[in-house]
Image (spheres, rainbow, N blue to C red):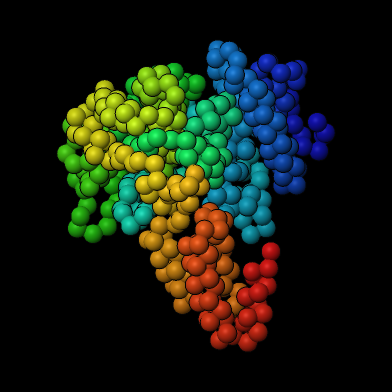
Amino acid sequence: MTNESSVQLSAQAPKMAGKAPALHLASITVPSTEGRCLVLISDCLAQDRKVRAKLRQLASGSKHKLKKALRHYCRADYAKVAALTTELARDDIKVGGTKEKKWTAQRALEEARKLSVCGQSVGKVVIRPILLEEKLRPVFKFFDPMDRARQRLAHNALKAATIFPPWMFLFNGGERAAITWLAEHLPKARAILVTDVPSCFALLPWQMVENGSLLPRRAIRSLLFDPWKRAKIAWPGPERPNSLGEAFLRGAIGASNCADEIGAGRGLPPGAVLSPIVAQLVLQKMLAENLLCEFPGIEIGLLADNLVILLPDKNLATLVIDRLTMLALNHFDDIVAHEFRRRTDAFKPGEAFKYLGRLIRVKNKRVSMDPLPGHRERLFESVCNDLGQAKSIEDFDRPVRRMVGFASRHGGSPATTLTVMRVAAAMADEASRYRDGLHGLNSLLDP
């Protein structure tokens, strides 16, 4: 390392596979000038990428060694700097930028060094509703970027050190991988089950979250359990819930016996950076033990809490549904089990079913996937709203991105093509009101 970054190395570990992460930049001294601080931040980001790649190599080895490596990683200054700068960037804060006086590069380094996954969070936390798929869903909002950076630090560690099975897609290629898998395996199925885990984040037992965790128990409790005690419910209007249970289960599963345990024995805070990957680890254990071990030959695919099960024999459908119900009884209660069973739909080969915002069917061993009508209409309404607020052709960038994203997500099905044509026609009609508007629109559409 050069003198330019004024870095003190606490140790220099050999760069060998199977060893703990290198301690290069694990302890830093903050330089006195902004330019040198920016250089040091860049060095920390590069080191963070290298060490996370090394953690990936350790993931399939000894769990004891992996836990030790994760402890080293979470204490390393380069990892803390990477976590904080990532969260600041998500707030559109460019560290050290000329317009950003509050978060200088020097301050970012100084604050990052204070991060600890086992420390206390002190920032404001509220639970507020957001509109998602035409439903109000409660989520946590962490106002202090330091709180979010602690979550990001633990998330980065777990993500680097976890190899999910190929049937779990949230961190294995996402929605596109799930759809590709389904298109390949669906024609072979003799029955299909489609379901989702009721109020997944709100009801996961804390004991299962802690058991077998690669992170220290103190970190799990500080990052995922303590926010429930500190959060205030910020709900507009007269329908403010009176309790956490009412907020998170309203309209979801009814008066579950688990409601009183939310925030006191159950629940991962939705909106927390760390929650999705921890929830996936718990669901992996649940499904592997209760389905894959009991019914060899079935295929399952999970994206977030959306589950599809492909059966090689239609006679297995009732048995698998019974097993899902038993899973819910063992880990939740009879009300959740009833809701889980109600949400689980069985389909024969050739029958159309809804999954991940698509209407999916098999005909002549070919899989067709069309966006749901509601999704198509919401796209058109959103684009029309964007166009109504546009003041120049440059403001068409947002509706163009909406259209391109929709087409990219849903592919070239007839319904997708018709929807994109309808949206493009609306944009062209609106663009014609501006001088050289159609030429400007073509420039936006030009890849």
| Residue at image location 57% in from the left, 67% down from the top | 400
Q: Residue 301 falls in which quadrant of the image?
A: top left
Of 237 and 399, the residue lying toward us = 399
Q: Percent x, y for residue 268?
A: 37, 34
**290 lies above or below 311:** above
**Which quarter shows the C terminus?**
bottom right
| Residue at image location 55% in from the left, 12% down from the top | 64
Q: Residue 325 falls in which quadrant of the image?
A: top left
Of 17 and 81, the residue lying toward us = 17
Labels in figure, total = 0
**338 lies above or below 428:** above
| Residue at image location 23% in from the left, 31% down from the top | 337
Classify residue 394 as left or right of residue 34: left
Can I make out residue 17 in this image?
yes
Of 255 and 64, the residue lying toward us = 255
Q: Percent x, y for residue 235?
A: 27, 53
**175 lies above or below 409:** above
**266 lies above or below 136:** above
Q: Percent x, y for residue 302?
A: 44, 36
**Which quarter shows the N terminus?**
top right
Task: Looking at this view, name the residue that lies furthest to the front.
Answer: 364
| Residue at image location 41% in from the left, 18% down from the top | 293
Of 179 and 340, the residue lying toward us = 179
Q: Percent x, y for residue 204?
A: 33, 30
Task: Looking at this view, name the residue that lies furthest to the right.
Answer: 2
